[in-house]
Amino acid sequence: MSTEQTPGALAGVRVIEAGQLLAGPFAGQLMGDLGADVVKVEPPGVGDPMRQWGREKPHGHSLWWPIVARNKRSVTLDLRRPEGQELFLRLVEHADVVVENFRPGTLERWNLGYERLKERNPGIVLVRVSGYGQTGPYSERAGYGSIGEAMGGLRYITGEPDRPPSRTGLSIGDSLAATHATVGTLAALLHRERTGEGQVVDSAIYEAVLAMTESLVTEWDVAGYQRERTGPILPNVAPSNVYPTADGHTILIAANQDTVFTRLAAAMGEPELAELPDYATHGARGARQEELDQRIAAWTSKHDAEALLALLHESGVPAGRIFRAADMLEDPHYAAREAVVRVPDPTFGSLAMPNVVPRLSGTPGSVRWTGPSLGQHNDEVYGELLGIAADERAALAEAGVI
C-alpha cells in the first residue's frame, strides 16, 4: 500500500458520529479511514470516555483514543439541552449519515429520533448500534459488547473444556457490530443514490456475533449437537492445532484439507500416512483428531521452529508463528504491505497502528491524523459549516451548549 494519501472512496460523505466508547465510534473510524468526513459530537468538558480508557497511559493520555478517533473532527455539544438539539439538527442538514450507539429510546427522549432527523434531511441514514437492537423485549436493556458476545453464542464456545467460558482479549462484540453497521451504511447509501430515500440501519451486538457462529444453531436444530469449548481446536477438523518445537516455540499448522494433509505427510517423511484409511479423508482424520495431533507433535518437537516453518512453507503447508505486537513490528511481510503504519501525533510524536482495511486499488483509504483534542474543530465546523459567528460561538461555549 502506498503511503500517499488519497481522498478515499467515501470522500464527500459526511458522517455525524454521536456515539461513545467503541461500538459506534469504530463504525465512524471505518468510514473515516475510507475518506468520509466524520464529525464526532462529544459532551462539553468531558468528551467520549474512550479518551480515558486503556491500561497504558504515557503522558497521561489513552493509547486507544488516537486510533478509534483517527480521521475524525471533534466538536462539543450538549444534546440534552434544546439549544444543543437544534444545533445537532443543523449539522444533520449538512450530513449523509448519523451514527449513534446510545441505549434505544435515548435519541427519542432528546427529540432527535429518526422521524425528526428525516424532517430536516429526508435522505439521512441513521445508523443505530446497540446491545439488543431497536426492537424486542430486551431492546431497552443496557448492553455492552461482552453481554452481546455471551448472548450471541461466542462466549460459551471460547476457552478450554474444563474451565468456565473465556473471552477474546479484544472488544470483539463491539467491533463486529460496528463492522456490520458499516456494511449496512454503505448499502443504505447505495439505495439512497438510486432512490433518494434514507433509512435506519439497526445493528445489534448479539446479532453481529450470532452472524459469525457458522452452523452452530443449525447443528442443534437439526442434529441436537451442541458445540462445546474445545481449546485450540475445532472438533473433527484435523490436523489444525498448535504444536511444540525443539527450541521451545509453538507453531500453528493447518493441514485439514486432503491435498494439504498429503503434503504434510510427505514433509514429515511419512507419505504413506495420507493413504491409510485412518487418515486418508477429512472425516477419518476428524475421528482420530487427538491421535493425529500427538503424532504430529512428536514430529514437530524434534525440529527448531525456523527450520520447521521453512520446510512447511516449501511443502505448501499452511503454518506460522503465533504473533505478538513485537513480532508484527518486525515482520517483513507486515512491512512490505504497510499493515502497520506510523502516524504523526502531537502528544506522542508518532504512533504505530493498524493500517486501513480493506485495500482499494483505485481509491485507497488512509490514516490522515490521529484522534483530535476535545472540541478541536468547534470553530471549523460551527463557524465554516454552519456559519455561526465568532461572538455567537463564544456565547454558546459560555453557556455550556458547546
Image: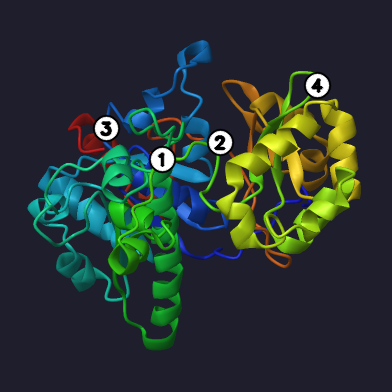
Mark sitting earlier along the chain (1/2)? 1
Measured as percent of width and height from the top left, residue 296 is found at: 74, 38
Mark sitting earlier along the chain (1/4)? 1
The disc at residue 246 is 4
Kind of residue at disc 2: Thr
Q: Which residue has dot 1 on it? A: 229
Measured as percent of width and height from the top left, residue 16 is found at: 36, 54
Mark sitting earlier along the chain (2/4)? 4
Residue in view at x 55 percent, y 43 percent: 233
Whether 44 is drawn above or below 179: the answer is above
Please name which of the two marks, 1 or 2, marks the residue nearer to the observer: 1
Q: Which residue has dot 2 on it? A: 370
Furthest residue toward bottom: 195
Disc 4 versus disc 3: distance between alpha carbons? 58 Å
Disc 1 versus disc 3: distance between alpha carbons? 45 Å
Residue in view at x 14 percent, y 54 percent: 139
Label 4: how many Cα within 10 Å (few below 14, some 14–19, many 20+): some
Classify mark 4: helix, strand or loop: loop
Left of 59 or right of it: where is 343?
right
Measured as percent of width and height from the top left, residue 77 is found at: 26, 41
Residue in view at x 35 percent, y 48 percent: 24
Whether tag 1 and tag 3 are in contact, CB under 8 A, the answer is: no
Furthest residue toward top: 59
Label 2: how many Cα within 10 Å (few below 14, some 14–19, many 20+): many
Whether 231 is drawn above or below 348: the answer is below
- Residue 324 found in image quarter: top right
Disc 2 versus disc 4: distance between alpha carbons? 43 Å
Kind of residue at disc 3: Pro
Q: Which residue has dot 3 on it? A: 44
